[in-house]
Image: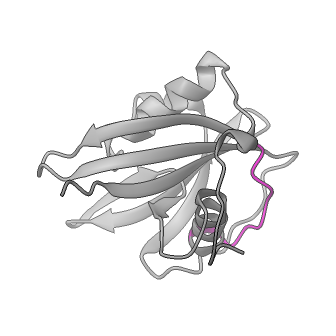
Amino acid sequence: MFKPNVTVACIVHAKNKFLVVEETVNGKATWNQPAGHLEANETLIQAVQRELWEETGLTLPVQYFLKLHQWIAPDKTPFLRFLFLIEAQEQFETQPQDSDIDCCHWVSADEIIHSQQLRSPLVRESLLCYQQGERYPLSLLGSFGTPFN
């Protein structure tokens, strides 16, 4: 049976800057949106809030769903990546809780688009989705049954 990896990611935008997390992958510093895998017994929204906390130390309300990306990584690993949006009022200080995250940066859209250190092409693609301006209500992603909280 085909079982793609289900991941979540969150664009955090404030005052014309975007929050990226930096982590070292194969000895190279890479940028990503706060992102990670869906875990058992959590909704997609719970997963993105957990990842945001783990990777940045921030607890901010997720406001919109932006897009579902289907992607096959160069190593042939299939992913379904659910992209969310937080429009923040200010650029908060971050304090990563996950030891895999080296630091966080507030950067411009151009810095992301032209960066050579993106974790995957989905980082740039996610920003382009944000710039297109389409926003969807979180209610689009229903969850029901146990053991969801």
The image position of residue 59, as x and y in percent, is: 77, 67
- Is residue 116 in sight in this rendering? no
> Considering only vertical position in the picture, is 115 above or below 145?
above
Most extreme residue toward the left, as rendered?
A: 75
> Considering only vertical position in the picture, is 97 above or below 135?
below
Most extreme residue toward the top, as rendered?
A: 132
Q: Which residue appears at 63% of the width and 64% of the height?
A: 52
Q: Which residue appears at 72% of the width and 43% of the height?
A: 138
The segment highlighted magenta reads: 55-63
**Which is more toward the observer, 19 or 75?**
75
Q: Which residue appears at 60% of the width and 17% of the height?
A: 132
**Quarter of the picture holding the N terminus:** bottom left
- What sort of colour scheme is used for the picture? one colour
- Is residue 131 in sight in this rendering? yes
Relative horizontal placement of residue 37, taking residue 92 as reference (left or right): left
Dominant SS of magenta comes to loop
Q: Which residue appears at 48% of the width and 73% of the height?
A: 39
The image position of residue 91, as x and y in percent, is: 78, 51
Relative horizontal placement of residue 35, taking residue 133 as reference (left or right): left
Q: Quadrant of residue 113?
A: top left
Most extreme residue toward the front, as rendered?
A: 145
Total residue callouts: 0
**Quarter of the picture holding the C terminus:** bottom right
The image position of residue 43, as x and y in percent, is: 61, 63
Relative horizontal placement of residue 10, taking residue 102 as reference (left or right): right
Relative horizontal placement of residue 140, taking residue 7 as reference (left or right): right
Q: Is residue 22 magenta?
A: no
The image position of residue 85, as x and y in percent, is: 68, 42
Q: Is residue 61 magenta?
A: yes
